[in-house]
Image (cartoon, rainbow, N blue to C red):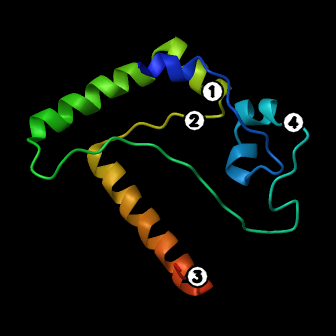
Amino acid sequence: MSVRHHLDRPAPYRSRAATRACRDQPVALALLPKVPTVSESGLPGFEAVTWFGFTVPTGTPRNIIDRLNVEVGKVLVMPDVKQKLALQGIDVAGGTPEQFGAYTRDEFAKRGRLVKESGATVN
């Protein structure tokens, strides 16, 4: 099954509230014009961001990592791919493998703190 197969399918969701990040994007606003942000709905400072990225096994040669980064970057800027992603409210943000690594480390640390502060447990 190809990536294009998934891009051609309609998004199977309905939103009751949008996050600020979503509302700040013109495309997302067009998709959810009458949906208030979560902050506007009574939870100021709420943030929820979904992100996607590619990872490789530890020890993958740097030339392979760089080539994958270049090739995926080429696909993500193709007009038809960008359009399909935009219609789903996805904002493409490429970068270097180091930037993605730093971002994921920061996100895991932030989410870990939230779980600890909430007192949530797994039963």
C-alpha distance separating marks 4 and 1 = 15 Å
Q: Residue at x 15, y 53 (%)?
A: 58
Instruction: Give the labeled residue for mark 1.
Output: 86
Q: Which element is circle 1 on?
A: helix
With 109 as the anchor, is 47 left or right in this view?
right
Residue 68: image location, x then y, percent? 24, 30
First reached walking from the N terminus: tag 2 or tag 3: 2
Q: Quadrant of residue 28?
A: top right
- What is the quadrant of the N terminus in the image? top left
- List the residue tagged with mark 2: 91
Depth order, front residue of 12/30: 12
Q: Position of residue 4 (x, y in %)?
A: 48, 16
Q: Say which mark, if any, is on residue 120.
A: 3
The amino acid marked with disc number 3 is Ala
What residue would you read off at disc 4?
A: 33
State the residue at coordinates (57%, 35%): 91
Q: Describe the element under mark 2 as helix, strand or loop.
A: loop
